[in-house]
Image (cartoon, grey):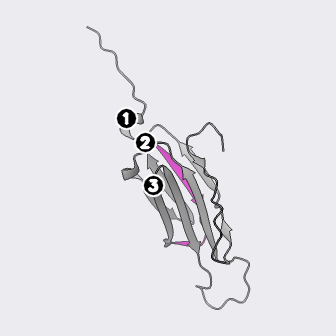
């Protein structure tokens, strides 16, 4: 990701995991337009109740859990249960009250609206 952007991944902590499940950093695309930032995260196999998003002190954390074995007896498996984890620093221009998330077809759509004072505005000039 470009270092000039305001939304940037944060280095993970050195805390040890208390589980043997793999922890995966999901693939993420981040877009910016005049009104908002849009974060798209690949979370295949994750149910809505398996996604936990938290915004605190300028940091956005994304945690998700993928379970397996829900479709019957496993007779062969290459897709393992896993935990997804990403942490981002968020610009102060984000309106934290307006953050919205939707999980659709294994992709998390996370909308981070910019505060109205941070949006670009066209000023019209009036003649006298």
Q: Are marks 1 and 2 in contact (CB under 8 Å)?
A: no
Label 2 Cα neighbours within 10 Å, binned few <14 / some 14-19 / many ≥20: many
> Which residue position holds label 1?
117
Which quadrant of the structure image shows residue 7?
Answer: top right
Locate residue 21, reporting x and y percent: 66, 76
- Give the farthest residue toward the top: 128
Q: Give whichever of 119, 104 is nearer the camera.
A: 119
Q: Which residues are magenta?
A: 36-48
SS under mark 1 = helix
Q: Give whichever of 91, 110 is nearer the camera.
A: 91
Query: Is 125 on the left-hand or right-hand side of 19?
Result: left
Closer to us: mark 3 or mark 2? 3
> Which residue position holds label 2?
114
> Which residue position holds label 3?
56
Which quadrant of the structure image shows residue 22?
Answer: bottom right
Relative to residue 9, is residue 23 depicted above or below? below
């Amino acid at each position: 990701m470009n270092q000039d952007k305001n939304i940037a991944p944060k280095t993970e902590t050195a805390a040890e995991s208390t589980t043997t499940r793999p922890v995966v950093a999901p693939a993420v695309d981040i877009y910016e337009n005049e009104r908002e930032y849009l974060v798209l995260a690949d979370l295949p196999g994750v149910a809505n109740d398996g996604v936990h998003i938290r915004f605190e002190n300028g940091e956005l954390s994304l945690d998700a859990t993928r379970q397996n074995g829900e479709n019957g007896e496993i007779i062969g498996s290459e897709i393992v249960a896993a935990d997804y984890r990403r942490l981002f620093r968020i610009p102060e221009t984000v309106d934290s009250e307006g953050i919205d998330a939707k999980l659709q077809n294994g992709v998390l759509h996370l909308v981070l609206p910019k505060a109205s004072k941070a949006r670009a505005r066209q000023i019209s000039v009036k003649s006298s």
